[in-house]
Amino acid sequence: MKEEVKLMKGNEAIAHAAVRYGCDGYFGYPITPQSEVLETLEALMPWETTGMVVLQAESEVASINMVYGGASTGKAVMTSSSSPGISLMQEGLSYIAAGELPALVVNVMRGGPGLGTIQPSQSDYFQATKGGGHGDYHYIVLAPSTVQEMADFVGLGFDLAFKYRTPAMLLADGVVGQMMEKVVLPEPRSRRTPEQIAEQCPWAVTGDPTGRKRNVLTTLELESDKMEVNNHRLQATYRRIEENEVRYQEYFMEDAEVVFVAFGSIARICLKAIEDAREQGIKVGLIRPITLWPFPTKRITELASKAKGFMVVELNAGQMVQDVRLAVEGKAPVYHYGRMGGVIPNPQEVFDATVSHFPFLKK
């Protein structure tokens, strides 16, 4: 079958991919710069073709609790929002994680703190990778840098969420959400039948009218010993994810003396800076974390044994750089270059900032 190439925004690609995945329900609330996700779903009207529910909730709090309810029944459900909206969802996300439920959350980041700006940012890194709500929990965090990955990571996020019974977040910055690129949409899947859900999700709260099977979902446990057992079970799941699901890409790393670390749209800017530097004979490379959690800690530790230094570039005041420093373990210097407030650096600015810390790069 010939591939069908489309030109669309990253946000639009998410909506199309969700319908094609066989998503059962989307519950969300408009906020810039991700509003096109909901708008595109409304235009596609999948309730008439696949039976997918699309509902604009009255708030972000309502939407994440609708996701909580839908996920508890074994359905493939999702929401999308942007930074302050995701902050409002944190309690619900903690409940979903504690309930060991699969769900997909899309966060197209904008600048903060507060209402901030509608311009792009990467300042939700801490909120996403450290479990922004209460309790000891994680969720899988995927960081796309292209519109194609925006589409591909919808299916990947759902698949990982169901594999490990945990929420997954697609963490994009506003650049990737708003820019237009060519994309090949995934092949359509059918929504699962109730029989398939019963077989694949024996834990689901299905409301069996016969009373022969009754699953009860609760995240409340008043006995400390039992609550600790629940926590140990969650931590065991997170260890399996860390062992099996780390994803990253490397560029020009064979002889790199200085390693850039960047994700999302900034990784693309860094790659251009590296290509320009390579034309001048300057040996720099890039590692782009695709999973921000689990983070490619082991690989960065390995690179630290031969690199002369690391340059972490982000659209924030310095968040991922902390994980890089922990991974490097003091074996090489780690510097940070960040822009905030929606300001996006160009490749020359990134390179100049790097040379200021590693003057030996200047030929």
Image: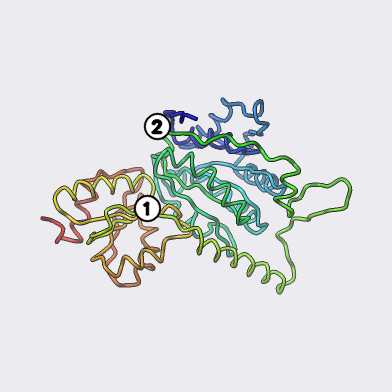
How is colour applied across the structure in the image?
Answer: rainbow
Mark 2 or 1, nearer chain start: 2
Q: CA distance from mark 2 to mark 1?
A: 21 Å
- Quarter of the image that includes the C terminus: bottom left
Q: Residues within 10 Å of mark 1 (few under 14, many from 20)?
A: few
Under circle 2, the secondary element is: strand
Q: Are marks 2 and 1 in contact (CB under 8 Å)?
A: no
Q: Amino acid at mark 1?
A: Gln
Report helix, strand or loop for mark 1.
strand
Of the pair 99 and 133, the residue shown nearer to us: 99
> Which residue is under mark 1?
249
Find the residue positioned furthest to the left. 363
Whole-percent x, y for residue 257 in the image: 22, 62
The residue at the point 83 percent across, 47 percent down is: 208
Frontmost residue, 59 versus 323? 323
Is 327 left, or right, of 350 in this rendering? right
Residue on which the image places disc 2: 182
Q: Position of residue 157 (x, y in %)?
A: 54, 48
Determine which of the numbered discs, if any, sits on residue 126 in the image: none
Image check: 204 left or right of 39? right
Measured as percent of width and height from the top left, residue 260 is found at 29, 56
* Quarter assignment of residue 136: bottom right
Determine the residue positioned at 75% across, 48% down.
Answer: 198
Q: Is residue 63 above or below residue 294?
A: above
Above/below status of 121 relative to 286: above
Q: Position of residue 228 (x, y in %)?
A: 67, 71
Residue type indicated by callout 2: Lys
